[in-house]
Amino acid sequence: MVLIRFLKSAFGPPRRDEPSVDPQAEMNALIAAHLRGDPRAFGQIVARYQVRLLNFVYRMIGDRERAEDLVQEAFLRVYRHLDRFDPSRKFSTWIYTIASNLAKNELRNRNRSPVITLEQARPRDEELARPVDFEDKGNRPDDLYERRSLKALVEETVARLAAHHREVFVLRELEGKSYEEIADIMHCNLGTVKSRLNRARQSFAELIQPHLD
């Protein structure tokens, strides 16, 4: 699909869990260590998910500083309720659900208080507005410039999607989540996920096409 090739050229393939280990078993071991009182365990959990959640929430709400606040709140909620986590569930689904709910609440609050739009909420300073964790130091300067331009175009286009389309698009195309995990995070069935994703892809293609001609 042209869309997938375009996104890969800008960001590389979506992030996946390492196949050489069982990520759920490894995460459950960290949770168990934390609950036993290991002071390092929760820090390792944060290190694994902090950048990923920041990228996700930033793309959802378009405000880097506020995204950092929401991710911090997400980790605080995880910390408070980690003893209630069901180890039969996938941890990434749980923590993404928490972050997603916080992001959606933020967007709802904005709609109730018509002070700023999503685009106006995006940081104006180029350094702050740049997505995090995307730099490839091994590329040539012209390659970096081209990829950064593509990334910026994708980020701006994603920000223009309707919120319910933006969420499913980011989770699938940029985070690489399975349909089943997206359904759990969004509290909907697989049919709704696929339907929203198809509409999100179509909207994304229509919005970005004029910039590619």
Image: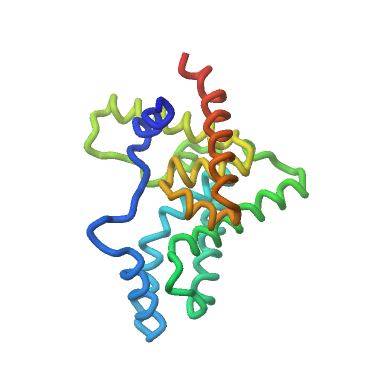
**Image vertical order of residue 73 relative to residue 142, above or below:** below
In the orientation shown, which residue stands out farthest toward the front? 191
**Image vertical order of residue 40 relative to residue 119, above or below:** below
Q: Pick the residue in front: 52 or 206.
A: 206
Query: Horizontally, is 30 left or right of 78 in the view?
Result: left
Query: Horizontally, is 206 left or right of 2 in the view?
Result: right
**Image vertical order of residue 22 relative to residue 175, above or below:** below
Q: Which residue shows up at 36% across the image and 66% down it?
A: 24
Residue 149 image-quadrant placement: top left
Total number of numbered discs in the rendering = 0
Q: Which residue shows up at 54% across the image and 59% down it?
A: 97
In the orientation shown, which residue stands out farthest toward the bottom? 36
Q: Pick the residue in front: 130 or 47.
A: 47
Find residue 74 and report its horizontal and vertical position in percent.
53, 64
Find residue 150 and report its horizontal and vertical position in percent.
41, 28
Residue 192 image-quadrant placement: top right
Q: Which residue shows up at 55% across the image and 62% down it?
A: 98
> Quick one: quadrant of the N terminus?
top left
Query: Horizontally, is 156 left or right of 48 in the view?
Result: right
Find residue 54 and report its horizontal and vertical position in percent.
47, 53
Q: Which residue shows up at 33% across the image and 37% down it?
A: 12
